[in-house]
């Protein structure tokens, strides 16, 4: 039994169009049950064989649909053809990555009907047991439901037959209290209860615990499956290998395991330390000054030991003047270098002031972490300090002392002075390039991309289980105020594991925390109330794990780069600057970042213990929140400029084209509607209104997979 032969649009001009041309498990079950009500029929045997083969083959990963040959349904994609009127050319279906509790639930009545007509073979009995286990282990998990929507708890119950009756009985849609407050759990692969009865020792009710007692599976003779879908081989009534039930989730799962945890903590500490040191102007110059002092003391001592023994071929390249000449050279180097250093510092301060007032105060980090600026200041200061240090060792010939000129040390001072002059030229050229807004935005873009690649994985299909925080959850507070910089997730995981608790951190890196306000919730894993000692331990751990600072950083803050680019865009639209071209360029960088984010997994980060039990959940910004951050202010402050509105429409069009996620499409569609309303409120002329509304239509077409070519005239 195969469903509709073509992709049919669910709603005209909407993005929800599906390809149903596959064999659906519940359709097979309905067809088999329908003919079983009359008499034994080959269709019942075919349906039972197909469903049993699918259950035995995939077990807990049973899919809602398959190809007619039993193969997996292909991924959903577009062909670039017109498709149905009002629809799109969708082929494939995302059910190949979904689970429906309805599927194994409907399989059980089908197996019972086949057994009553003596059509259930050994593979069918094994499939019935596997279906019972799948329902038992996965009945508390969120599933896609019969309409293949996003996963949710309790959307569609399974309907297995009750023991001793032919009536269906639904499983409870909500998880029991011990299931971890609605979070799916990885269950043991070992059989329990009635399902653990060895095959061939009793009725189906004693074997599966759910099928009707009206038939005995031991009386059925094995036969070959009627379907061309071939399951894994089984011997007689031997039960096929039992599948381990794993919580489907492609988000980052981290277990606390010895050396890996230590390495992770070292990486986190190193990243935070490097970021903090790179944004300070003093560390590199300070290290250079210390190095200059060491060389200024050490090289003259080396000169005193080896100068008299150097060959003429070497001394020919060293400083050969007397004490007065050496003092003159060193004094000239020191006096000129301190002047150049003052000029360099002045130019740096002016650049920082320009970046703060003209672009955004949050761009100061881009300049203060510039390695060439650090190297320039370090070399200039080191040369000045080195010349002064060597100058004190030069001695003239007196009655009580002999003349001493450190030839190697003075030569090194001369070489450092030449290097400082070259560095000054490079610094001025670099500074002229750095103060350009395009350069600054490209650096922010690169830094944000690196942060995304470090923190986020590529998006993959996974079950989105809603986190239900219990009413009796303990509130954990911040112990100090400041910007949320980073969190030591492994320390928090260790504390949650020790306290047998689940911790949910619902504040995002980059947010401003106030001492004494909630940052997280915690509750006991088994549903009991946390005792006082566990509360104090978790509160102490959350206070130590969360790092705060006086400014936002990009260590764990995915949205910080978008915030910087939005600030530049909005500042360019201010009356004091009035530079819409810069705003348009900024929106181009924002669009590129959003398209990259659309391909990343933005779900919460989940950390599990060694038993794969959820212990820590770290919230991350959703795509809807990031899109609002990127679009809201430019739309508000650029509402009077048609070019800015046009670039915003193109941004939404590009993002809509770059993602196939329905949630992302819904967020983009909402922003398109808001942008269209903003355009309607403006007092533009007819031509501008038509152009902008044409771009709005193009953005909406991108939501359904269309990108019409721009008309042109070819001679």
Image: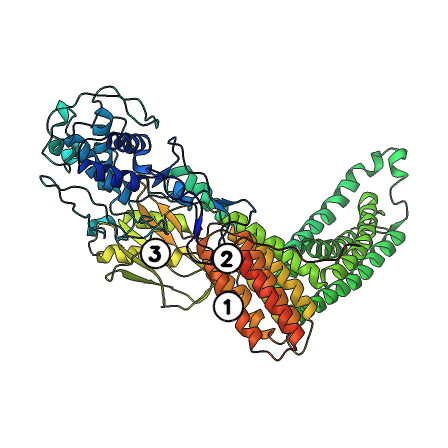
Q: Position of residue 677 (x, y in %)?
A: 53, 73
For residue 63, above or below residue 374: above
Outermost residue to the front: 38
Q: Residues within 10 Å of mark 3 (few under 14, many from 20)?
A: many
Q: Which residue has dot 3 on it? A: 504
Specify the quadrant of the image occupied by residue 430.
bottom right
Q: Judging from the image, what secondary structure is the residue with disc 2 in? A: loop
Q: Which residue has dot 2 on it? A: 557
Find out whether the residues at labels 1 and 3 contact each other: C-beta distance under 8 Å: no
In space, the residues marked 2 and 3 are separated at their CA atoms by 18 Å
For marks 1 and 3 on the same chain, the one whose residue lies earlier in the sequence: 3
Q: Nearer the viewer, residue 119 or 291?
A: 119
Q: Is residue 374 visible?
A: yes
In this rendering, position of residue 397 left or right of residue 271: right
Q: Nearer the viewer, residue 507 or 341?
A: 507
Specify the quadrant of the image occupied by residue 630.
bottom right
Q: Position of residue 507 (x, y in %)?
A: 41, 61
Q: Is residue 104 visible?
A: no
In space, the residues marked 1 and 3 are separated at their CA atoms by 34 Å
For residue 687, above or below residue 698: below
Find out whether the residues at labels 2 and 1 contact each other: C-beta distance under 8 Å: no
User: Residue drawn at (37%, 31%), measured in percent from left and top?
Assistant: 70
For marks 2 and 3 on the same chain, the one whose residue lies earlier in the sequence: 3
Q: Nearer the viewer, residue 706 or 408?
A: 706
For residue 515, above or below residue 411: below
Q: Residues within 10 Å of mark 2 (few under 14, many from 20)?
A: many
Q: Which residue has dot 1 on it? A: 673
Q: Mark 1, mark 3: which one is toward the viewer?
A: 1
Q: Judging from the image, what secondary structure is the residue with disc 1 in? A: helix
């Amino acid at each position: 039994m195969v469903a509709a032969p073509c992709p049919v649009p669910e709603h005209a001009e909407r993005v929800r169009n599906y390809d149903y041309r596959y064999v659906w498990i519940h359709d097979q079950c309905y067809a088999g049950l329908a003919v079983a009500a009359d008499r034994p029929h080959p269709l019942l045997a075919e349906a039972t064989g197909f469903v049993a083969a699918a259950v035995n083959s995939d077990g807990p990963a049973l899919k809602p649909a398959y190809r007619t040959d039993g193969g997996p349904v292909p991924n959903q994609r577009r062909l670039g053809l017109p498709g149905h009127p009002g629809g799109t050319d969708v082929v494939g279906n995302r059910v190949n990555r979904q689970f429906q509790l309805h599927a194994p639930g409907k399989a059980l009545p089908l197996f019972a009907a086949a057994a009553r007509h003596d059509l259930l073979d050994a593979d069918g009995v094994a499939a019935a047991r596997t279906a019972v286990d799948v329902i038992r282990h996965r009945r508390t998990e969120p599933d896609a439901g019969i309409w293949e929507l996003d996963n949710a708890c309790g959307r569609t119950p399974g309907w297995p037959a009750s023991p001793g009756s032919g009536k269906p009985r639904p499983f409870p849609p909500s998880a029991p209290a011990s299931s971890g407050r609605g979070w799916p759990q990885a269950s043991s692969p070992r059989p329990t209860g009635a399902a653990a009865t060895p095959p061939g020792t009793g009725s189906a009710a004693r074997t599966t615990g759910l099928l009707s007692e009206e038939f005995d599976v031991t009386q059925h003779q094995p036969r070959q499956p009627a379907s061309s879908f071939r399951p894994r081989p089984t011997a007689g009534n031997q039960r096929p290998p039992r599948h381990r039930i794993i919580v489907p989730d492609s988000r980052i799962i981290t277990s606390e395991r010895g050396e890996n945890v230590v390495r992770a903590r070292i990486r986190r500490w190193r990243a935070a330390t490097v970021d903090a040191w790179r944004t300070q102007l003093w560390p590199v110059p300070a290290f250079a000054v210390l190095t200059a002092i060491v060389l200024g003391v050490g090289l003259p001592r080396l000169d005193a030991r080896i100068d008299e023994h150097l060959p003429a071929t070497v001394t020919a390249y060293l400083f050969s003047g007397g004490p007065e000449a050496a003092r003159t050279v060193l004094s000239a180097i020191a006096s000129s270098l301190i002047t150049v250093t003052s000029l360099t510092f002045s130019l740096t301060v002016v650049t920082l002031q320009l970046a703060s007032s003209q672009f955004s105060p949050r761009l100061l980090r881009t300049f203060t972490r510039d390695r060439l600026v650090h190297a320039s200041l370090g070399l200039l200061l080191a040369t000045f300090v080195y010349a002064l240090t060597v100058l004190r060792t030069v001695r003239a010939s007196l009655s009580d002392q002999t003349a001493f000129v450190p030839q190697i040390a003075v030569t090194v001072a001369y070489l450092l002075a030449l290097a400082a002059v070259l560095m000054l030229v490079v610094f001025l050229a670099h500074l002229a390039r750095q103060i350009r807004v395009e350069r600054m935005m490209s650096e922010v873009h690169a830094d944000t991309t690196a942060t995304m690649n470090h923190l986020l994985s590529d998006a993959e299909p996974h079950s989105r289980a809603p986190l239900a925080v219990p009413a009796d959850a303990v509130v954990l507070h911040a112990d100090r105020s400041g910007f949320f910089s980073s969190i030591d997730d492994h320390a928090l995981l260790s504390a949650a594991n020790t306290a047998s608790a689940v911790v949910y951190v619902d504040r995002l890196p980059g947010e401003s925390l106030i001492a004494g306000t909630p940052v997280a919730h915690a509750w006991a894993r088994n549903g009991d109330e946390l005792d006082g000692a566990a509360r104090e331990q978790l509160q102490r751990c959350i206070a130590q794990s969360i790092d705060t600072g006086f400014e936002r950083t990009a260590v764990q803050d995915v949205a910080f780069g978008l915030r910087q680019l939005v600030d530049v865009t909005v500042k360019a639209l201010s009356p004091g600057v009035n530079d819409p071209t810069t705003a348009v360029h900024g929106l181009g960088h924002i669009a590129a970042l959003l398209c990259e984010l659309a391909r990343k997994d933005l779900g919460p980060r989940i950390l599990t213990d060694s038993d794969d039990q959820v212990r820590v959940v770290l919230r991350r910004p959703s795509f809807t929140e990031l899109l609002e951050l990127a679009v809201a202010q430019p739309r508000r402050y650029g509402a009077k400029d048609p070019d800015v509105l046009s670039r915003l429409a193109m941004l939404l069009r590009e993002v809509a084209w770059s993602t196939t996620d329905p949630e992302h499409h819904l967020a983009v569609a909402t922003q398109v509607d808001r942008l269209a309303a903003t355009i309607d409120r403006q007092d533009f002329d007819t031509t501008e209104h038509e152009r902008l509304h044409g771009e709005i239509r193009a953005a909406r077409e991108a939501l359904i997979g269309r990108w019409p070519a721009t008309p042109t005239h070819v001679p």
